[in-house]
Image (tube, rainbow, N blue to C red):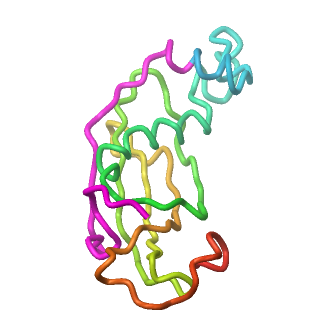
Amino acid sequence: MTSVAGRYYEDIVIGDLRESGPHTVTREELLEFATRYDPQYFHADPVAARDSIFGEVVASGIHTAALWRALDHEISGDILWICGVAWEEVRWPQPVRAGDALRARAETLSKRQSRSDANRGIVEIRYSLLNQRDEIVFTCRSVNLIEVRESARGSAGDGAPILSEAI
């Protein structure tokens, strides 16, 4: 485990709600991502996208998740992550359009010590990405392993399993 300064499992508070600053999405950004990673016509072709249910180019869901992840570093980048283990209840209820000003939100839902490794805590977080109208454009519930402060470690196991057995 690392000894870098940051928030350990013990520092995470259930109910804590944090929000990033905004990022305004450009049409060029949407097209660049879509052309490279998700070239469906309503993501990558402005002319053809006019005939889609969106009426214009919109962000790919994967691009939307990547935008959330970049903004989330503002509010969660100091957590001493070990790794994420699951995304559950992943939704894209509204499309992201050029000009949208997005901000990330993280709400800590629950936490518990790992049963298999005293070096790890399990924290569930509800992540959301909102636009300038406070509409949710991406949301998921994430299960994460976070480092336990050395002085708080017990003897929950030998530390071997990292994923499913750790939660």
Task: Please state, as top left, top right, bottom left or bottom right, where the C terminus lies in the image.
Answer: bottom right
Q: Residue at x 66, y 29 (%)?
A: 53
Q: Residue at x 47, y 36 (%)?
A: 67
The quadrant in which residue 13 appears is bottom left
What secondary structure predominates along the stretch shown in magenta? loop
Q: Is residue 93 above or below residue 126?
A: above
Q: On the rendered structure, is 108 left or right of 64?
A: left
Say which quarter of the image contains residue 159: bottom right
Residue 116 image offset from top left, x and y in percent: 57, 85
| The stretch drawn in magenta includes residue 45 | no
Of residue 87 and residue 144, the one placed in the foreground of this image is 144
Residue stretch rendered in magenta on the structure: 1-30
Q: Quadrant of residue 164?
A: bottom right
Q: Quadrant of the N terminus?
A: bottom left
Relative image position of residue 64 (x, y in whole percent): 53, 37
Give the farthest residue toward the right. Answer: 40
| Residue at horizontal 49 percent and vertical 68 percent from the top | 145
**Which residue is more in the foreground, 82 or 144?**
82
